[in-house]
Image: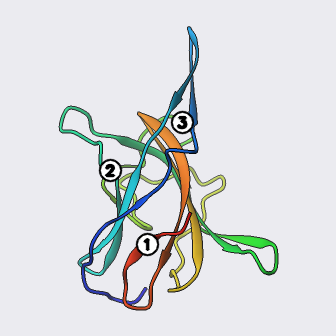
Amino acid sequence: MAVVRPLRKARFGWATLPAVLLTLAGCTSIYIDLDGYYEGGELWFDDPNRSWFNRHCVRAVSVTWLDEKADRQEAMWEADSSGHDCITTAPFRYGRTELPPDRAGFVPPRPLVPGVRYEIFVELDNGAGSGFFSITDDGQVINAD
């Protein structure tokens, strides 16, 4: 991955894509946002609604390259805890986990390319969702919804 200078954060618009949390009382929609930014040459993701009262356990994350012209997609990074433990906590870095992910379905991180549209899915302990982002040639992380 190319080293880039830290730039402003980009918020991915997940408000239109609900994550469903099943409870004993029924279904409740949980909406989350996610910020993406570069810091120290690494791509970080964070929940802007995170507080010090909770650690925001990350149970699963996947980043997928979308080639809409060829109608195909390719996994760039996938890590999952199989719903048991946190693989990391928010904020988290692209390709890095604190605990080893479940090997079933694990895709090690691959370099991200500027100008390409990616989809990110993340499951936190307070919700889940997906959104789209891209990296500009000058290293900005932008919302690509």
Side of 16 relative to 12 (left or right): right
- Residue 41: give x, y in percent of width and height: 29, 81
Dot 3: within a 10 Å radius of its alpha carbon, few (fewer than 14), some, or many (20 or more) residues? few
The type of residue carrying mark 1 is Ile
Going 29% across and 42% down the picture, which residue do you hit?
Answer: 49
In front of the other: 75 or 80: 75
- Residue 44: give x, y in percent of width and height: 34, 66
Image quarter hosting the N terminus: bottom left
Image quarter hosting the C terminus: bottom right
The type of residue carrying mark 3 is Gly
Q: Read off the residue under disc 3.
A: 83
Of marks 2 and 3, the one in the foreground: 2
In front of the other: 69 or 16: 16
In front of the other: 106 or 138: 138
Sequence-first tag of 1 and 3: 3
Side of 31 relative to 55 (left or right): right
Sequence-first tag of 2 and 1: 2
Tell me the distance, in whole angstroms, between the alpha carbons under discs 1 and 3.
29 Å
Q: Read off the residue under disc 2.
A: 90
What mark, if any, has residue 142 been given in the picture? 1
Sequence-first tag of 2 and 3: 3
Relative vertical location of residue 24 with respect to residue 34 in this rendering, above or below: above
Side of 1 relative to 81 (left or right): left
Going 45% across and 85% down the picture, which residue do you hit?
Answer: 136
Q: Is residue 1 visible?
A: yes
Query: Residue lying furthest right in this view?
Result: 70
Going 33% across and 76% down the picture, which residue do you hit?
Answer: 42
